[in-house]
Image: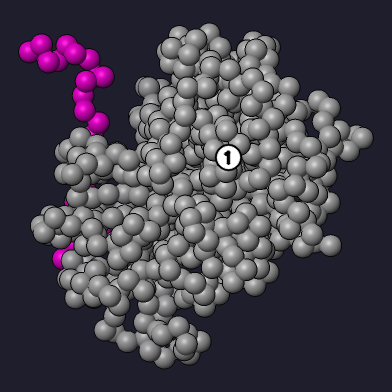
Amino acid sequence: MADFELGSNFIPTLHKPSALLPIAKHHDSLLYLIEKNPVTIVVGQTGSGKTTQIPQFLEHAGWCSDGKIIGVTQPRRVAATTVAVRVAEEYGCELGKEVGYSIRFEDVTSAATRIKFLTDGLLIREALVDPLLSRYAVIMVDEAHERSISTDILLGLLKKIRKRRPELRIIISSATLQAEDYLRFFSQQPENRESREGVTGSIGSIISLEGRMYPVDVLYLEAPTEDYVEKAISTVFDIHTHEAEGDVLVFLTGREEIDKAVQVVAERSAQLPPASQAILALPLYAGLSTEQQMFVFDNPPENTRKVIFSTNIAEASVTIDGIVYVVDSGFVKLRAFDPQTGIEALTATPVSKAAASQRAGRAGRTKPGKCFRLYTERNFQTLPDANIPEIQRSNLAPFVLQLKALGIDNVVRFDYLTPPPAELMIKATELLFSLGALDEYAKLTKPLGTRMAELAVEPMMAKTLLTASSFGCLSEVLTIAAMTSLGGSIWVQREGEKKQVESARRKFAAEEGDHLTLLNVYQTFVTKGKKESRFCHENHLNFKAMTRAISIRAQLKRYLERFGISVDESLRTSVGNRGEQIRRCLTTGYFAHAARMQPDGSFRNVEGGMTLYAHPSSLMFNRKADWVVFHEVMETGGKIFIRDITKIEKGWLVEYASGYYQLKQ
Ligand code: CDP
Ligand code: MG
């Protein structure tokens, strides 16, 4: 009896029985096809059950009985983690037991794991240690239509591996209809890829799962908007006051916009008439912790409309039930690398038609819905049909390095689904050569190049780490590498606390720039702060992020120890005169990201004369400097910002990167 008094909090979440999902009817034919064909391509709308059900079908059918596992790759970390949580729940196990996930610096799997969700980048990394990926009985490359650079490279590798492991089963799942391209890719020899022949039935087949879709009314703006964030917010309130029940999903481009929108909605909803339905605004983007991401799946409190502000994560990778209204800003942040300037930035770019219709489709999953596009119909007509694959617009240096480490010396002749442009290839090779990872024959150097490929950080940071012991600052650089790998802010700014956060940050500020500031934060956290959450709370620091930094640092340290590089931790307490050594060391890795301050306070990058601005979160924002190196680049509102900036001397560039800058003259 007492059970009934526990309250609604204790009633387990009710899942739609998986038997009702569109995929259920295809259970037998899917298993048959996978058994018979080395490659199976599954096409089906988002929400049909591909990601959550197929691995379970396979596991139940005995594909793991000989100790091998099922791997499901995702282009995004968030998707890997949220989907693993869901499947573990359905499977009825603790996360990390039979069902687990693995993303960079975070492995939640165990000896018991049979279904493993991981990012496609991580699976490529696993191939460095286990070139035939022999632990896997089945590999499902999920969301292949996104054409992330890692997905493309992985498909090329799987094609090679398949020849040596005919028993391996490859499943490619895609929400759009380019299925035949994948099949042709796997069927043909690299030499005659152009010909349309050779698509035999023997290698693979395509199965399409028709999902039930309700009609979605698409509405456009009459005139373009200047500010899509503000427009999105006002549209949410229009929906809330004029439309029937149903949750809202808003597509914006990134964390800053999303945090702002969530905050504004929370403030304005306080002014709603007391009797009306409430609004609960929630963010969804990659920088959130796993727990924070899970909130969007919870049912809202009674008499409350849930509004989720999301990046394009919610476009195809994760499914949120109950969405009836979609608001589409029409923009997405995409990687864009400019070989002229050597700068890769995440840039807000208009979506493609395919993405826009995918977004609209999110409104029609459970009943008829509406999609509000924050652009005109004419504008829609001018959008490209599909996005350019990432491999054609990215900095390829990390991938060239990995391909070389996988023994693929001729990276130009690698079997790509879509080959990257030659100039990107040249640029990547040039950078790797200047970093010392490649020799003049474009062969991987030993040990520097091979070690750089193995380290789980990008090449510039890998070089910095591997040079640090010669500058006597390895312990410090390890910390800096960990702190810059967090992928989110370490500062927590609650409403109305801007001043307090500023002054907390000032306490840790180092004159020389952000890297040494990050080092101060970490060192104070582990010494004076005793790694405690109280210290973080008092200093407006994100405790979870700081704890993660400790874990990442330990993992990087293990890599180095495996290389036989020992880390002297005895010098930890004060940075002292090692500041200059650390900055010199950073220059050996980040010379390609060097810039000089202009009289107006902006920066100009050395290589391409591009104008850059210190990000407001940087210590160098509104401060004087001369030469600097920087870690990260982002574009917001048409301006290019740099983050994690450190002062250097011009002479150091000549000393550590003369080759690189001479190439340009
Ligand atoms: O991969 P696909 O888009 O085909 O579908 P899925 O991710 O396997 O999702 C199947 C169903 O599971 C969806 O309709 C959602 O209702 C549900 N689901 C959920 O409620 N929560 C999640 N974290 C993931 C899926
Ligand atoms: Mg999916």
Depth check, front residue: 663 or 175 = 663
Please rate how many residues cluster around mark 1, counting C-alpha atoms within 10 Å: few if below 14, some from 14 to 19, many from 20: few
Residue under the point 18% across and 66% down: 31
Residue under the point 18% across and 57% down: 68
Residue under the point 63% across and 61% down: 433
Side (left or right) of 269 relative to 610: left
Q: Is residue 137 visible?
A: yes
Residue assigned mark 1: 470
Measured as percent of width and height from the top left, residue 196 is found at 45, 89
Side (left or right) of 176 relative to 524: left
The amino acid type, in three-letter code, at marker 1 is: Ser
Side (left or right) of 401 relative to 62: right
Residue at the left extreme, as displayed: 1
Magenta span contains residue 164: no
Q: In which quarter of the image is residue 67?
A: bottom left
Depth check, front residue: 68 or 373 = 68
Measured as percent of width and height from the top left, residue 340 is found at 76, 60
Q: Image height check: is 251 above or below 160?
A: above
Q: Is mark 1 on a helix, strand or loop?
A: helix
Magenta span contains residue 13: yes
Q: Is residue 241 visible?
A: no
Residue at the right extreme, as displayed: 599
Depth check, front residue: 321 or 516 = 516
Q: Image height check: is 368 above or below 663?
A: above
Q: What stretch is highlighted in magenta?
A: 1-28
Depth check, front residue: 5 or 487 = 487
Measured as percent of width and height from the top left, residue 492 is found at 55, 20
Side (left or right) of 589 relative to 538: right
Which quadrant would the N terminus be assigned to in this image?
top left
Residue under the point 18% across and 44% down: 111
